[in-house]
Amino acid sequence: MVLGAFAVLLLLDPLRFASPVAAPDSVPDWATDPTPVRRPSESPEYRVGVFRYGCSDCHRIIPSASEGRELPIQHTEIRLEHGINTRCLNCHHPTNRDAFVADSGAEIPWNQPQLLCAKCHGPVYRDWQHGAHGRTNGYWDTSRGEQTRRRCIECHDPHKPPFPSMVAAPGPDTLRMGRQQVGDHAGQDNPLRVLRHPRVDGAYPRIDGAEDVLKEGP
C-alpha cells in the first residue's frame, strides 16, 4: 500500500522541480565571431578597382610635402581623424613608403603595425602583449593548437581608430540568483554587502550588533 501510494504521488508530481538556473539569453552571432573586424592588406599596396599599385611605385616619383598635413588627391577616401596626429609622416616612413617609421627614424615593417602604435599607445600595447587588450584566437592550451593575437589595425582603422557606437552583448546570468536587476540596493538585506549603513559624522556605525570591527578612519 505504501509503495502504491508513492507510485501515485510520483505520477501526480504535485511538487514540480524548479531549476535555479535562469533561462539562457540569445547571444548574437557577431558577439562570438572570431573573424577580424577589418582585413588590412598584408603588403604595402594601394587598390583602385581591380588594379593594385605598390606604395613606393607612386611615391618614388611623386614626392610628398615635407609637412604632409594635406592628404594627396590620390587618397581622398581617407578620413584622418586620429586625435592630434595630423601628419602622414608621423607614421609613414618619409623615404620608404613600404614601411612605417619609428621615433628614431628606423623602418618598422609593414606587417608589424603594433610596433608603430606602441610609439604613442604604450600602456595599451603592454596590455595587448599580455592578452588584456584585443582578441586572442586559437587555443589557450598551445599544446593543442596555435594561438594568435589580432593586430591593432585588424580592429581599428589606423586613420580613424575610434569605434562607432555598438550594441552591447547581453551580460551573464548567475547560477542561483536568477536574472539580476541593476538598480538601487538601499533597504535590501544583501549578505554580499559588508557595510550596510552609510558613514555618519566621520565614523562607521555598528553593524547589526556585531563587534565593533570597523574603526574610525579616513
Image (tube, helix red, strand yellow):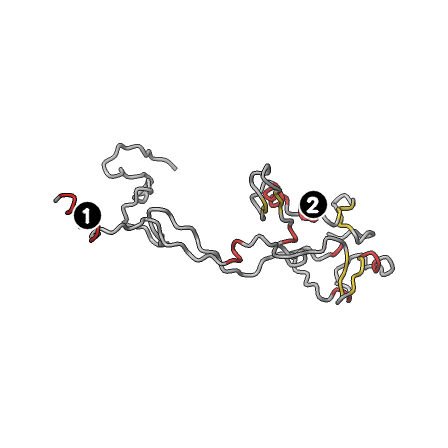
Q: Nearer the viewer, residue 5 or 173?
A: 5
Instruction: Report the side of 53 relative to 160 (left or right).
Output: right
Please identify, in this view, whether the residue under mark 1 or under mark 2 is nearer the observer.
Answer: 1
The residue shown at (78%, 61%) is: 52
Residue 89, x across and y down, in percent? 76, 54
Residue for badge 2: 115
Give the mark nearer the N terminus: 1 vs 2. Answer: 1
Horizontal arrangement in the rendering, residue 107 relative to residue 196 (left or right): right
Residue 145 at x, y percent in the picture: 60, 41
Q: Quadrant of residue 48?
A: bottom right
Q: Which quarter of the image is occupied by the C terminus? A: top left
Q: On residue 218, which mark appears?
A: none
Which label is found at residue 7? 1
At numbered mark 1, what does the secondary structure look like: helix, strand or loop? helix
Q: Nearer the viewer, residue 15 or 62?
A: 15
Q: At x 44% / y 58%, what residue is drawn?
A: 26
Q: Give the amino acid at mark 1.
A: Ala
Q: Are marks 1 and 2 in contact (CB under 8 Å)?
A: no
Q: Is residue 190 left or right of residue 73?
A: left
Amino acid found under the numbered disc labelled 2: Leu
Nearer to me, 137 or 60: 137
Compared across the picture, whether 57 is left or right of 212 comes to right
Q: CA gap, disc 1 to disc 2?
A: 72 Å
Where in the figure is residue 187, as x and y percent of width and height?
27, 49
Outermost residue toward the left? 1
Please name the residue shown 17% across and 50% down the image: 8
Q: Name the residue nearer the viewer: 10 or 94.
A: 10
Asked whether residue 152 is in view, the answer is yes
